[in-house]
Image: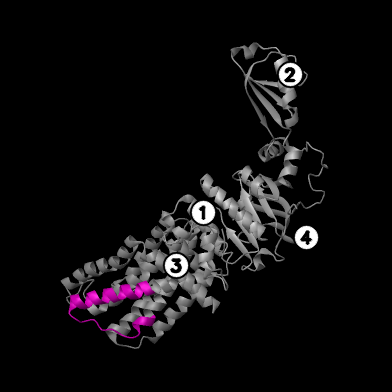
C-alpha cells in the first residue's frame, strides 16, 4: 500500500508540474501533429506509385505512433532527471522512503497517460485526413505502454549521462532521429543497403513498428514482436532505474 | 546521554581534492549542532556523508544507531543546500507530495502553520518570496516529525525577517526535542541557535565546543576603540598606563573589560584627550574562527592543549 501511495504522490506532483507548463503541454501534443501533417502530405503525393513513401497510409501508422512513443518519453524523462539534479531533489528524495524504481514508475505512468492522449489525437487526425482508412487493434494499447516504458528507461540513461537539460535535448535528438528512420517506421528495410539491415534488428523501435504494423495493417499475429518489446522494456526500465542518481 | 550522530575519522575525496580530512565528531540527542565554515570548507559534503547521499573513502558514520545506508528514513529530515522543489506547485501541494512519500505524515495545515505559510498556502512556489520559499522547504522536512533534522544553510539568501522566523522555528524544534544538525557561514546564526559549534576549514574540523567556550578560548579579549577628535590626533603623544595601538585616528585598547571602560576614559581625560566616540566590543565567534583558521588552533584561554573537549571525539551536547 505504501508503494502505491508513494508512486501516486510522485506521479501526481509530476502531472501537476507538467500541465502547468503550458508551452510544454502545447508542443508535446502539437509536435507529433506537425510531423503527421508533413509526412501525411508527402505520403499523399504518391500513395501507391513507388518511391520512398509509396505505401498506403495505413502502412505508416506505426511510424506516426513511433514518433510519439519515442521522442516524448526520451526527452521528458531525461529533462526531468536534469531538473531534479539541478534542484538537488534527488538528494532530498534519497532521505525519504521513495525508491528509485518507484520514482521511475511514477514518471513512466505520467508519460503513459501523455502518450495515450497524444496517440489518440494523432490517430484521430489521421482518420479525419484519410477518411476512415485506419484500422485499430486492441494490441495497440500494450504496444504503446511497453514502448513508453522502454523509452522512459532509455531516457533515464540519457538523463544520467548528460550533465544538463541542454545536453539531454541534444542527446535525445541525436538518438531518436536515426532510430525513427532506421526502424522500419517510414522506410522499409528493403530500401536500405543490405549491410545495414542487421542494424535495424538492433533498434528496439523496430519491434514496436513491426508489431503495430502486424496488428493494424497486415492483420497478422503480433505476439513475437510484443514479447521482444516486453523483454526490452523490462531491461531498459531496470537499467534506467539503476542509472538514476541516488543522492547528490 | 545518547548520541544521534557519530563520525569517526571520516575522509572524503573528490578525485585528488580532499573534501573531508579525518573528521570526527558526535552530536548528542536533542542538541543543536552548527557546522560553521566558509564556502568550500566541506560543510555540505559532511552533511551528505552523514545522510548517506554521498559515499566516503574511509572512517565510520553512525546516525541514530545505523550506518547511513541502512538509516530508517522515517526518522530523519534533510533540507539540502540550494534545494528547489517543483516550482509550479503550491506549498500545500508540495507538502501533500512529500507527505505522500511517508507511511505516516503530519497534517498539512499544521505544518503550514508551523512555517507561517497559511496565507500563501495556495500560491505557486515560484511566486513566493525568498523567505517564504525557504520556509516552505523547511516545512517539507517536518512532515515525518524527524528525530534528527539536517538543515544545510537554511537561511542563505533570505531577508532578516525571514531569517528570524527560521531561527524561531529551529529553536522551537529544538525545544521539542528534535536533534538539529545545521550548517551555516553566518556566525551570528550559529551563536544564536547552537548548543555546540563545529568549526570546519578546508575539510578539517578544527575545533568544537559551545559558542561561549570557543569565544573564550580563541576569540581574544574584549576591546575599546576610541575615535579621537580632530586632526590633532595624529600628533598626539599619550602617556597612558594601559597599552594601546594606533589605527589611524583611533586608539584601540585590547583586553578591556566592560567594568574597566571608565578607567580608560578617565585616563584619556587626564591627558586632555578629546574624543568623538567610544566603541566597546566583545570577542565573537567570528573572531574565534578567524583566530583558529589564520593562526592555527593555539588556544588563548585556559583549556588543555587538545582543545575544548578532553575527549578524543568532540561531543555536541545541549547545555543546561
Q: Is residue B309 left or right of residue B180?
A: right
Mark 4 neighbour class, 10 Å CA radius: few under 14, some 14 to 19, many 20 or more: few
Q: Mark 4 highlights which residue?
A: B1
Q: Mark 3 highlights which residue?
A: A13
Q: Which mark is residue B134?
A: 1
Residue at the image point whose x is 66% and y is 53% from the top: B12
Residue A77 is drawn in which quadrant? bottom left
Marks 4/3: CA–CA distance: 41 Å
Residues behind callouts 1 and 4 on a single chain: yes
Q: Which mark is residue B19?
A: none
In reply to whether residue A124 is colored magenta, the answer given is yes
Residues behind callouts 4 and 3 on a single chain: no
Foreground label between 3 and 1:
1
Q: Mark 1 lies on which chain?
A: B
Q: In this view, does B308 lie to the left or right of A145?
A: right
Q: Which chain carries label 2?
A: B
In reply to whether residue A125 is colored magenta, the answer given is yes
Q: Mark 3 lies on which chain?
A: A
Q: Mark 2 highlights which residue?
A: B267
Marks 1/2: CA–CA distance: 52 Å
The magenta stretch is A113-142
Marks 1/4: CA–CA distance: 32 Å
Amino acid at each position: 500500500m505504501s508503494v502505491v501511495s508513494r508512486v501516486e504522490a510522485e506521479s501526481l506532483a509530476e502531472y501537476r508540474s507538467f500541465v502547468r507548463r503550458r508551452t510544454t503541454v502545447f508542443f508535446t501534443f502539437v509536435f507529433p501533429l506537425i510531423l503527421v501533417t508533413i509526412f501525411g502530405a508527402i505520403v499523399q503525393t504518391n500513395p501507391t506509385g513507388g518511391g520512398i513513401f509509396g505505401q498506403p497510409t495505413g502502412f505508416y501508422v506505426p511510424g506516426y505512433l513511433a514518433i510519439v512513443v519515442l521522442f516524448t518519453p526520451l526527452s521528458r524523462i531525461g529533462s526531468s532527471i536534469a531538473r531534479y539534479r539541478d534542484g538537488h531533489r534527488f538528494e532530498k528524495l534519497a532521505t525519504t522512503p521513495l525508491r528509485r524504481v518507484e520514482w521511475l514508475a511514477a514518471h513512466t505512468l505520467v508519460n503513459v497517460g501523455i502518450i495515450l492522449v497524444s496517440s489518440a489525437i494523432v490517430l484521430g487526425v489521421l482518420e479525419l485526413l484519410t477518411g476512415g482508412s485506419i484500422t485499430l487493434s486492441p494490441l495497440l494499447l500494450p504496444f504503446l505502454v511497453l514502448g513508453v516504458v522502454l523509452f522512459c528507461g532509455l531516457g533515464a540513461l540519457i538523463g544520467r549521462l548528460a550533465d544538463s537539460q541542454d545536453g539531454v535535448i541534444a542527446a535525445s535528438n541525436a538518438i531518436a532521429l536515426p532510430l525513427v528512420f532506421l526502424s522500419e517506421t517510414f522506410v522499409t528495410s528493403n530500401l536500405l543497403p543490405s549491410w545495414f539491415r542487421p542494424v535495424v534488428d538492433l533498434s528496439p523501435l523496430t519491434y514496436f513498428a513491426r508489431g503495430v504494423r502486424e496488428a493494424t495493417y497486415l492483420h497478422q499475429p503480433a505476439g513475437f514482436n510484443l514479447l521482444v518489446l516486453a523483454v526490452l522494456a523490462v531491461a531498459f526500465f531496470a537499467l534506467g532505474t539503476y542509472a538514476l542518481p541516488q543522492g547528490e | 546521554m545518547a548520541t544521534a550522530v557519530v563520525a569517526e575519522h571520516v575522509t572524503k575525496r573528490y578525485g585528488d581534492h580532499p573534501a573531508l580530512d579525518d573528521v570526527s565528531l558526535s552530536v548528542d540527542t536533542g542538541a543543536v549542532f552548527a557546522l560553521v565554515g566558509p564556502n568550500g570548507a566541506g560543510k555540505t559534503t559532511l552533511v551528505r556523508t552523514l545522510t548517506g547521499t554521498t559515499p566516503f573513502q574511509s572512517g565510520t558514520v553512525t546516525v541514530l544507531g545505523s550506518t547511513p545506508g541502512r538509516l530508517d528514513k522515517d526518522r530523519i529530515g534533510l533540507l539540502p543546500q540550494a534545494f528547489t522543489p517543483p516550482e509550479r506547485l503550491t506549498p500545500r501541494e508540495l507538502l501533500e507530495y512529500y507527505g505522500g512519500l511517508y507511511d505516516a505524515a503530519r497534517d498539512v495545515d499544521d505544518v503550514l502553520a508551523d512555517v507561517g505559510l497559511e496565507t500563501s498556502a495556495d500560491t505557486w512556489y515560484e511566486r513566493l518570496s525568498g523567505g517564504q520559499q525557504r520556509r516552505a522547504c523547511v516545512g517539507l522536512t517536518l512532515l515525518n516529525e524527524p528525530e534528527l533534522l539536517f538543515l544545510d544553510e537554511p537561511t542563505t539568501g533570505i531577508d532578516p525577517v525571514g531569517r528570524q522566523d527560521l531561527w524561531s522555528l529551529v529553536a522551537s524544534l529544538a525545544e521539542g526535542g528534535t536533534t538539529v544538525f545545521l550548517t551555516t557561514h553566518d556566525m551570528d546564526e550559529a551563536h544564536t541557535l547552537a548548543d555546540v559549534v563545529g568549526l570546519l576549514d578546508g575539510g578539517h574540523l578544527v575545533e568544537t565546543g559551545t559558542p561561549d567556550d570557543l569565544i573564550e578560548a580563541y576569540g581574544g579579549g574584549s576591546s575599546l576603540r576610541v575615535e579621537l577628535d580632530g586632526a590633532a590626533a595624529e600628533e598626539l603623544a599619550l602617556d597612558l598606563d594601559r597599552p594601546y595601538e594606533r589605527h589611524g585616528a583611533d586608539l584601540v585598547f585590547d583586553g578591556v573589560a566592560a567594568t574597566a571602560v571608565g578607567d580608560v576614559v578617565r585616563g584619556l581625560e587626564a591627558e586632555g584627550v578629546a574624543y568623538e566616540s567610544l566603541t566597546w566590543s566583545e570577542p565573537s565567534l567570528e573572531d574565534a574562527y578567524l583566530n583558529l583558521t589564520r593562526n592555527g588552533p593555539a588556544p588563548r584561554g585556559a583549556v588543555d592543549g587538545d582543545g575544548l573537549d578532553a575527549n578524543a571525539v568532540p561531543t555536541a551536547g545541549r547545555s543546561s
